[in-house]
Image (tube, grey):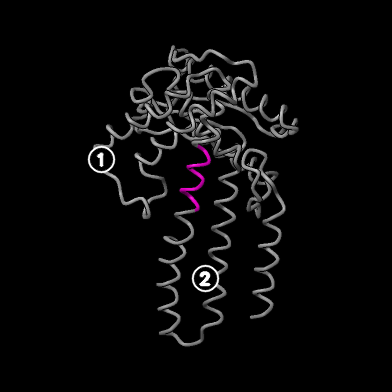
Amino acid sequence: MKKLFFVVGLLLLSSACSTNPFTGKKTLALVPNSQLFPTAFQQYGQFLSENKVITGTAESEMIKRVGQRIKVASERWLNANGHAGYLKDYQWEYNLVDSEQVNAWCMPGGKIVFYTGILPIADNEAGVAAIMGHEVAHALGNHGQQRMSAGMLQQLGAVAGNVAIKDEQSRALFNQAYGIGSQVGVMLPFSRSHETEADKIGIYLMAIAGYNPDEASQLWERMKANSGGQAPPEFLSTHPSNDTRIANLSEWAAEAKTEARKFGITQFRNN
């Protein structure tokens, strides 16, 4: 039992070895990018082969254009802050996929998908930039890597508890309490913190890319309207509430413009 907890301790120590330049925080990194990226690239290729990718349209070209501008903004920020080469292993790709889902995502390593279903809510190119900045920020913040690492530690904690508790009834109670407690008390807040980080990093990136950061909060007004107000309580959700996000993004817009001015950006586009 002592040996098992010693291993857990070693894993926790090793997780504090990587500092993310965008957040300045120590991050969980039990799965290195050298393993994570190739797996993500393979999964992305398989996803594209199984879905209808839209090419040669104004909308698909817009996705690529916005993605490229957000990528350049990321590189400019990193270079200016002493992190040149941070993205050397990224293989950027931006694709529009035919689906009614109101969603977009970015895999570790820069593989991005927008679904056609989210474009009406994006409404304009700055809206697309707000979404793109947010999704790219998840990758830049190593959020996928951290979620995988946290999941590994969550499973390890469950194993440790089951090994330590000999009584079957007590073990069953532990498993029930640990499952609910670790999810509501640890994993969900962890996920919400990632969403908030991605919102803040993303609004900075869209501004440095030359897009109006005021559009970010307006995007989430449209997201809220599209949801019809149907959402679980925030403490039971993987994401902050719409109202929380709108308030945060409204507050951060001025900061994002100030940051963009450091890069010579003084005018911001909506389209």
Kind of element beneath mark 2: helix
Does residue 89 appear to the left or right of 200 in the view shown? right
Query: Which quarter of the figure is the N terminus placed in?
Result: bottom right
Question: Where, quadrant-wise, is the C terminus in this rendering?
Answer: top left
**How would you classify the magenta stretch by its main secondary structure?**
helix
Q: In this view, does 137 lie to the left or right of 82?
A: left
Left or right of 221 in this view: 85: right
- Amino acid on which disc 1 is placed: Gly
Find the magenta span and give its range: 190-198
Report which residue position mark 2 lands on.
158
Amino acid type at circle 2 is: Ala
* Residue 48: x %, y % from top left: 49, 31
Q: In terms of sequence position, does the residue under pointer 2 or pointer 1 come before the other?
A: 2
Helix, strand, or loop for circle 1? loop
| 189 versus 76 height, above or below | below
Q: Where is residue 160 in the image (x, y as percent from the top left)?
A: 57, 74
| Residue drawn at (28%, 32%) of the image | 226
Picture layout, residue 115 above or below residue 212: below
255 or 185, nearer to the observer = 255
